[in-house]
Image (spheres, rainbow, N blue to C red):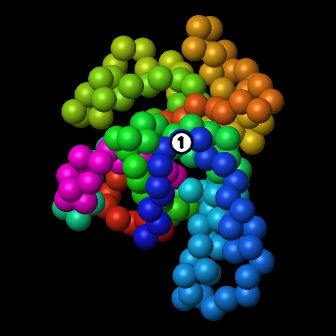
Amino acid sequence: MAVLLGTHALQPPKCFDSLKCSETSETSPVRSSTRLVDLFDDQLALVKTVRNTDWLDLIRKLNGGNVFRTSVSLPPPGAVKMRLFGEQRTNCAGLVWDRSQVDLSEAYIWPSGYMAKTEFNLTHKGELVNGRSSALVTIERLVECNRRGLTTNAETGELQEVADGATMNFNEINWPCGGARGLV
């Protein structure tokens, strides 16, 4: 299982380049790391930052056998130049799911910069309230926005390019998680 450390803006680590070039067996740690790098490069890695105090509850939910809604982000290609949800001092690590292994057919998806605030705008029945459905996008649109470096303008709601050298805000995918399936 992959665990990400920190919630600061994702930057290209130097070790990833050497991992991509390594010849390894299917079961080696380096091979697993290469798979993770490939998932990030191909925008197939869904990232969930976890508040330090919420790990036990999340693990119970993952092992409980019941479906529960949770939010993740889809970083841009290479997983660089995007701020993840949370603060480093309170969310020091997270989990990664392989997007191709999870069912997003009932997911709510918002582009970078849109503050969906699902903790307040999603009912216990999984219904959106307070106009949050107006900004939903498809997964294909989110992938394209990530590829082109587009974020939502907080004042106008329009998509705009992220300035050179700037970091885009997290996007949000809220989906019914059925457990550990797809965890990397």
For residue 179, what is the image quadrant? bottom left
| In the image, residue 58 lies in the stretch drawn in magenta | yes
Image: magenta residue range: 46-61
Circle 1 residues within 10 Å: few <14, some 14–19, many ≥20: some
What's the magenta bit mostly, secondary-structure-wise?
Answer: helix
x and y percent of residue 17 in the render? 75, 67
Seen from this angle, which residue lies furthest front?
Answer: 89
Q: Which residue is mark 1?
A: 8
Seen from this angle, which residue lies furthest top?
Answer: 155
| In the image, residue 159 lies in the stretch drawn in magenta | no
Who's the residue at 22% across and 33% down the image? 124
Tag 1 secondary structure: loop
Asked if residue 51 can be seen in this view, the reply is: yes
x and y percent of residue 25 in the render? 63, 91
For residue 138, what is the image quadrant? top right
- The vertical placement of 131 against 180, above or below, is above
Along the horizontal axis of the image, is 15 left or right of 127?
A: right
Asked if residue 182 can be seen in this view, the reply is: no
For residue 83, what is the image quadrant? top right
x and y percent of residue 21 in the render? 77, 77
Q: How many marks?
A: 1
Who's the residue at 57% across and 46% down the image? 74
Who's the residue at 36% across and 14% down the image? 130
- The vertical placement of 172 against 46, above or below, is above
Q: Quadrant of the N terminus?
A: bottom left
Amino acid type of the residue tagged 1 in the rendering: His
x and y percent of residue 35 in the render? 62, 72
Along the horizontal axis of the image, is 69 left or right of 4?
A: left
- The vertical placement of 84 against 110, above or below, is below
Seen from this angle, which residue lies furthest bottom?
Answer: 25
